[in-house]
Image: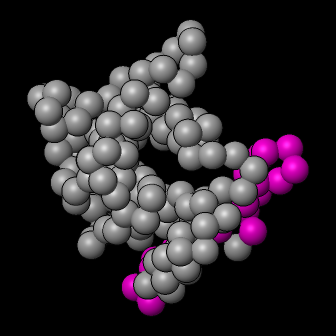
Amino acid sequence: MSDGATEVYFYHLERRTLEEVLPTLLERSLERGWRATVQAASEERVEALDTLLWTYREESFLAHGRARDGFAEAQPIYLTAGGDNPNGAQVRFLVDGAKLDDAAPYARVVYVFDGRDEAAVSQARAAWQNAKAQGLSVSYWQQDAGGRWQQKA
């Protein structure tokens, strides 16, 4: 549970793909001592992310699970296409246009969207406006030429 207002971050992908960025963002969340839930828009995408987190780096992987694996409450990272949060995550990542009904249970909600996809940009704008209307703390992050994240708003 969040001890204050939920922070809502928007990560605008332009130079790198979700597959390149998500593992690092998840690693940073775990370093903070947070559990994470990643919500995708479909079970097929969850399957692809499941494979990604086991194989994204030759020398490492990110321990995670999904409903079919069991022991969801013990997973540091939980993958889902639904609104569930069985691992008690403090941070929720929304990818591929996934939608969240209630941000209150989280310290941080992170929208990761493809800046080359007009529909994704439009969805992110709507989510931004909704978060602002709820009085949540919002910030917008974009990659610089070197691929580092810079806060733009």
Work out whether 147 lies above or below 33: below
Quadrant position of residue 96? bottom left
**Magenta part of the chain:** 131-152
Magenta span has 150? yes
Q: Nearer the viewer, residue 144 or 28?
A: 144
Work out whether 129 lies above or below 36: below
Query: Residue at left 75%, top 68%?
Result: 152
Q: Residue furthest bottom?
A: 133
Work out whether 26 lies above or below 74: below
Screen quadrant of the N terminus: bottom left
Query: Residue at left 57%, top 19%?
Result: 57
Query: Residue at left 32%, top 29%?
Result: 64
Work out whether 29 lies above or below 135: above
Drawn side of residue 35 relative to residue 65, left or right: right
Q: How many marks?
A: 0
Give x and y (percent) for residue 92. Answer: 38, 54
Q: Nearer the viewer, residue 59 or 90?
A: 59
Give x and y (percent) for residue 133. Answer: 45, 89
Drawn side of residue 123 relative to residue 17, left or right: left
Q: Residue furthest right?
A: 145
Drawn side of residue 78 relative to residue 122, left or right: left
- Residue 13: tell me if it is visible: yes
Screen quadrant of the C terminus: bottom right
Query: Residue at left 43%, top 84%?
Result: 130
- Residue 7: tell me if it is visible: no
Quadrant position of residue 86? top left
What is the basis of the colouring in this image?
one colour
